[in-house]
Image (cartoon, rainbow, N blue to C red):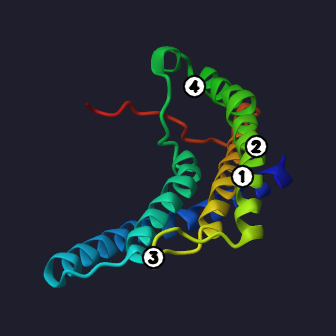
């Protein structure tokens, strides 16, 4: 179990770094958006490249932020049964849901989105807008984001198996958001 926990820790560390980058991208996206709006209204000048850069940062935030959010146990759950289960029951439900739904779905979506990226890469796809950016790099974010989410799923399954066997104690408590 120790080697598997080392793999889980490595995946967690990678997603922690990705989360840090995503946090910086939130600030950068706000700054680019504000600067672009100020330049557009103050000087009647704008750039499609800056607008597309905002979209690209947002896409990176969504696709890579999902694995970071999953690592932090802050993803959305269906609470109908989850909150009525014991701690062990919640660990089992998390593990089964991740193995049966999350990982296969993410791998399928990564597989299906790979040709979408490769086609854009092979033709050197550019934005159709004047001053726009290359499109293929952002299209790579789609399969890469799903692979990272699947890897974090593997990490979570490893941690839950270890917790069920008594090797580790994990804080997998889900707190219902206040509404």
Residue found at x 76% / y 54% = 114
Q: Picture quarter containing residue 92?
A: top right
Which is more foreground, mark 3 or mark 4? Answer: 3
Residue found at x 57% / y 57% = 64
Front residue of 159 and 54: 54
Q: Earlier in the sequence, mark 4 or mark 1?
A: 4
Where residue 137 appears, x then y in whole percent? 63, 69
Residue found at x 75% / y 60% = 119
Q: Are marks 1 and 3 in contact (CB under 8 Å)?
A: no
Q: Which residue is mark 4?
A: 87
Q: How many residues crowd mark 2 within 10 Å: few (<14), some (14–19), many (20+)? A: some
Q: Earlier in the sequence, mark 3 or mark 4?
A: 4
Which is more foreground, mark 2 or mark 4? Answer: 2
Residue found at x 50% / y 29% = 77
Q: Earlier in the sequence, mark 2 or mark 3?
A: 2
Where residue 134 appears, x then y in whole percent? 59, 74
Q: Are marks 3 and 4 in contact (CB under 8 Å)?
A: no
Q: Are marks 2 and 1 in contact (CB under 8 Å)?
A: yes
Q: In what element is the residue under mark 2?
A: helix
Q: In what element is the residue under mark 4?
A: helix
Residue 107: which numbered mark, if any?
Answer: 2
Q: Which residue is mark 3?
A: 130
Q: How many residues crowd mark 4 within 10 Å: few (<14), some (14–19), many (20+)? A: some
Which is more foreground, mark 1 or mark 3? Answer: 3
Question: What whole-number distance in Å separates the C-alpha atoms at marks 2 and 4?
Answer: 28 Å
171 on left or right of 98: left
Residue 147: which numbered mark, if any?
Answer: 1
Question: What whole-number distance in Å separates the C-alpha atoms at marks 1 and 3?
Answer: 32 Å
Front residue of 111 and 7: 111
């Amino acid at each position: 179990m120790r080697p598997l926990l080392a793999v889980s820790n490595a995946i967690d560390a990678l997603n922690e770094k990705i989360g840090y980058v995503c946090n910086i991208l939130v600030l950068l996206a706000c700054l680019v958006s504000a600067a672009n709006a100020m330049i557009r209204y103050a000087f009647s000048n704008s750039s499609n490249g800056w607008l597309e850069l905002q979209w690209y940062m947002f896409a990176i935030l969504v696709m890579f932020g999902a694995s970071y959010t999953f690592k932090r146990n802050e993803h959305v759950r269906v609470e109908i049964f989850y909150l009525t289960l014991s701690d062990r029951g919640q660990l089992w439900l998390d593990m089964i849901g991740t193995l049966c739904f999350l990982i296969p779905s993410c791998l399928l979506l990564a597989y299906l989105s790979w040709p979408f990226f490769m086609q854009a890469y092979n033709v050197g796809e550019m934005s159709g807008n004047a001053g726009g950016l290359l499109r293929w790099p952002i299209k790579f974010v789609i399969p890469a984001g799903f692979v990272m989410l699947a890897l974090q799923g593997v990490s979570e399954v490893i941690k839950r198996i270890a917790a069920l066997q008594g090797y580790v104690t994990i804080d997998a408590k889900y707190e219902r958001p206040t509404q």
